Every structure is written in C-alpha cells, then in structure tokens.
Amino acid sequence: MGDCEPTLVNHEMEHHIVAAAQHLIMALRASTNLNIDDMRSFLSNVEARLSTKSTPIESRGGPLMDMEEQLRQCEIVIMRWEANQSLIWDSSSEETSEYMNAAAEIQKLVENLESVSPIRNGKQKELLLRAQNILQRAMSRLTEELRHILVLYKEYHEPRYMSCRSFVEDVVYDESFASIEDEAAELTSHAEDGGSASAERRVSLIRPDMVPALKSIAQVMFSSKYDQEFCQAYVSIRKEALHEYLVILKMEQLTIEDTLRMDWDKMSNEIKKWAWAMRIIVRVYLASEKHLCNEVLGEFGSVNSETFVEITKASMLLFLNFGEAIIMSPRQPEKLFRVLDMYEVLAELCNYVDALYSEYAGASFRIEFHDLLASVGDYARGTFAEFRNRVALDRSQKPFGGGGIHPLTKYAMNYIKVLSAYRGPLNLLLCDREVKCLEPCLGIDNEEECSADSSCALAVHLRSLVSVLESNLIEKSKLFKDTSIQHIFLMNNIHYMVQKIKDSDLRRYFGDEWIRKHIGKYQQHATSYLRATWSSALSLLKDGGNQALSFCKPTFRERCKAFCLAFEEVYKCQTRWIIRDPQLRSDMQIATTQKVIHAYRTFLGVNLGSIGEKYIKYTADDMENYILDLFEGSPKSLPHPWKK
C-alpha cells in the first residue's frame, strides 16, 4: 500500500497508452501501403502484448476500490462499539482482537493514503478524510478503555507490612523535666536494627492479567501518533492513584510557609509521618510504578522515563519541599532526633532514588535528593553543636533544691542515651569534626571492642559531652553554701550518670574503666559528705577521752547534750535533702549509721554512769531509726528537741 501514488498514476497512464496503441494498430491495418511481412508481424506482436496489458486493467476495479472495501470492513467493527458502553476488554478475546486489528488496519490505510502527495484524486481525498475520522473515533474509544482499565482494575495495598524503626520520644529541656521519672518512657525503644533498609518490595498496582491490554493499547495508539493522548490519560490516572496512597499515609499538602509556622509538637509529628511515608512510597509504590511503566511503555524509549517522572513529580516535590522547610527552621536541640530520622531515611533511599530516576528525565530529582541529604546532614551537625552549647552554658541562679539530680543531668543523659541509637548516621556526620575530649578512651578489656566502639567518632563526642556536663555540675554545686550538700549534689548526679551509662548501650562507648573511675568519684563524694557533716559532732564524743572522767561529771553530760543538739540540726536539715536512688540512699544511711551510731554507742557505753541515764535524750537505737529519715526529701523535726 506504501506505493499507492505510482500505482494510481501508472494505471491512468497505462490506460491512455493502451488506447492510443490500439488506435494506431487499427490505422496501420487499414493502410494499403504495407507490403513488408516483417512489419505486419511486428505489429501483430505489439497487439498481442498490448492485449495482455489491457485485459487485467479492464477486469479490475483499481486500488482505491480495494482500500475502500477494507475501510468499510474496519468501520463496521469500530462503529459497532460506538453505542456499546461495556468495556471491549470485558468481551471475548476474539472481539477484542478484532477491534485492535481493525484499529491497526485503519492506521495503515491512513498512512498509505497520506503517502500520496499531492492528492489529486477526489475519491482518494474522500477516503482519507473518512479513514482519519474513523481512526480518531477508535483512538478516542481506546483512550476511554485505557482510563477504565486503570481505574477498574487498580489494586490497593495497605502499607501495613512495611517495617520502620519506632521513633524515640522527644527529649526537651524545661522545668517539667525535674519531675519526670525515667521509667515512664523507655527512650531507647529506637532499636538500632529497626531502621535497617529492607529490600525493595514491588506490588501489583494493576491486576496482572490486564497489563497486556494496556500494552496493546499503547502500541496501537503510539503507532497511530496518538502517543500524547495515551500519556496524558495514563499520567492523569496513575498520578491520582499515587495521591490516594499519600492520603492513606496521612501526608498533607503543606507549603514551606505552613511548615515553618508549626509549633514543635506538630512539626515533630509531621516529620515522623514524612519519614514513614517516604520509605513506603519510594521503596514500594514508586518502585512498583516504575515497574508498571516499564511493562507498558518499555519499548518506547525516553517516553517511559518521562511518563514515570510526570506521574511521581508531585509526590516527590511534596517530600522534598517538606525537607527543605525543616532545615529552614531554627536549630534547636529537641529537633535533632527527628532530623536524624530524616537523614537516615534520605541516606537509606539514595540508591533507590538513583535507580528510579537514572535516566535524563529524572536527573533533577536525583540532584535535589542528594542536595537535601547533604543539607539535612549539615543541619544535624549544627543542631548537635547547639545541644553541646546548651549543656555547657546552662547557668543557674540558685542551688537546686535538696541536692538532688539536676534537670540538666537528666536531660543531658537521656539525650545522650538516645544519641547512641543513631550510631550509624552520627559516625558519618561527626567523623570530620574535631572535639576536645576531656575523657579519652579509657582501657577496655577487649581491644577489638575499644577500636570498634570506644574509638569511633560518636564515642569521642559522647565522652566529651559528659565531661562538659560534669564540669557544669561542679560549678552548680558551688551555689550551695553548705559543703555537705555540695557533696550530696555531686554524688547524686555522678551516680545518675554512671547508672545511665552502665545499664545501657552507652557502656560500650565509655568503657568499664570510665565506669570504675566515676564510681570512685561519687563514692569519694559520699566519704567527703560524712566527713563534712559529722566530724565536728563526733569530735564531741572523743574530746578528752577517759582522761576527762577524772575531772568532773558535767563535762560528759554537756558533751552528750551538745552532740544531741548537733544531731537534731542535721536531722532537721538533711531530712529535706534527697537521694532519689533507693540503693544509694540506703548505702548512705548505712554508712552514716556505722560512723555515727557506733561512736555514740561506744560513748554512752563508756560514760553512761558519769552522764546519768535521765540526761540521755536519744538512745543509740533511737538515733539509728532517725537516720533512716535522712535524704527522703521530706523536712522533719525531732519531737521535743533540746533547747540550746
């Protein structure tokens, strides 16, 4: 059919030549001057040859008639479905094949008719317009079929199976932190293995048995030069389907301004949703969308990747713009964990995004994604530095009541404990950041463990942070005028730090030697407390010893009274002091009992006769019981205290 023009022209010319030749032969035969036999013989041969030429021309109707008949047959098939509202692909396979073959044949007829240029034959022009009209009807119907297949045979997948690491609670430093019990929320539920990248998981977005139908429609529409109509319909439906998944994942269409106006609680929740949704969208739905595009449009070159980019553009921009908005907000320590969640997700998905947008059409997304990863990393480093500054520069105007665990200690240690769960990203982000570490890697029994954990970038920074905290606590202890409570305060806070490290994964970053060293520190503060509190009172029980007995009895009575008065002062003051850890409090009460009651009991035992039993207000057993009231955080007074 591609040689339609020469066929039609030759047919017309041939018809005229044959007619002229036949007329010439008749004239020659009528001539009386032809005497040469060879001439007659030649003309006979020409007549015979021309006769054989003229016979098929006269007997056939010509190419246009054949094409018209072919068009009529195809038109019957196409128009039969015009009034039929049911899907062609819901009919029999024979009817489906018949329609697709008819559409393909019309496309070929249009090509053949259009190949004759210029078109001089009126009948030919009429056939071309008619074929184009029928082809347009067929393409319009196939576009509707495409839409219906994409909608009716769409498969839904709830995002329940996607495993994502649980998110840590925000660690915020404010006045309320003093009353927070650590056991109320297990901050380290952020398990290290919970966020490991799982393999890409594709799902069927369209019922698998309908994918060949989409491919057939694409082939016919592309060959008919209706590729734009196909792509517009395909992109429109698939983009809407992807948006539905974003709605299921509760992703809101937020502008950068909307994000920046959020309070932190709202922003934190949005980041959690963003991290969870992005993993699912990229690893599951975009991977599946890419696979579907490859199946349907894989043979059409760059159109495949361009279509995929158009389908996913709005969704990807939604995720990227949100990330840009977050890093435009002020850097605050409470944001660090959410930002590290973002960094982990972006780092984890980099290879996926590179593969999804590997062609030229997706280059801008690859670049934006990598730029956002770098920017989020810089933001996280800056936020980490803000946390360090907060710990170092936190200043108090008055001593913390009762000498208990300071809110800064709780805040910093819980914060550091959570940081350890982000070992991977933090080691990457902090490896090139120098830090003055006041606590170098102290001896760990296992050399391999030391090199792997205590020598890593995160470990160096964590030890430095704890050193900064300890220095700040020493400064805060100086706000107490009483030396005894200074030691109680430092003992409480260093003990808390040791327990947090010893009973968690932090242990591998600090090492056993660090723990032993700091146990020694808080034990030394306990000893210093006993000395500062009781040395003066206990000296009353030792003055003069047995030699004093030889002078006068009132001396021992006065000493006993003075000691009891000192004990009453300690009791009144130190019952309001607090040692929150039950074991540490018990240890301090036992140590006090051993030091004080033993001396008092010995004093009474030796000097009871000289003092007189009626002048002994508190027995050793009484004092031992009263010591159990110390460090409870509830101010008390002894009944009927002696007047000074």
Image (spheres, helix red, strand yellow):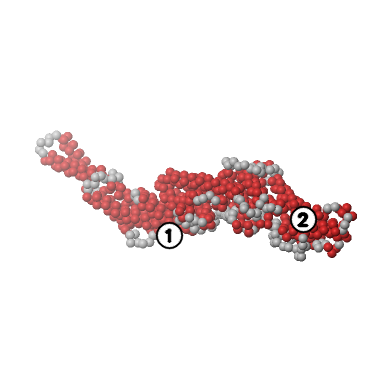
Image quadrant where residue 533 sits: bottom right
Residue position for label 1: 152
Q: Amino acid at mark 1?
A: Leu
Q: Position of residue 499 (x, y in %)?
A: 68, 52
Q: Residues within 10 Å of mark 1 (few under 14, many from 20)?
A: few
Question: What is the spatial separation of the Cα atoms under label 1 and label 2, in whole angstroms?
Answer: 81 Å
Q: Residue at x 22, y 50 (%)?
A: 122
Task: Name the N-terminal-most of marks 1 and 2.
Answer: 1
Residue 515 relative to residue 273: left or right: right
Q: Position of residue 636 (x, y in %)?
A: 72, 62
Numbered circle sitting on residue 592: 2
Farthest residue in the left direction?
32
Q: Position of residue 582 (x, y in %)?
A: 71, 58
Q: Residues within 10 Å of mark 2 (few under 14, many from 20)?
A: many
Looking at this view, is 85 or 22 the one in front? 85
Looking at this view, is 325 or 153 the one in front? 325
Residue 32 relative to residue 533: left or right: left
Q: Position of residue 40 (x, y in %)?
A: 16, 37
Looking at this view, is 326 or 477 the one in front? 477
Q: Residue at x 66, y 46 (%)?
A: 510
Element type at mark 2: helix
Q: Residue at x 39, y 51 (%)?
A: 231
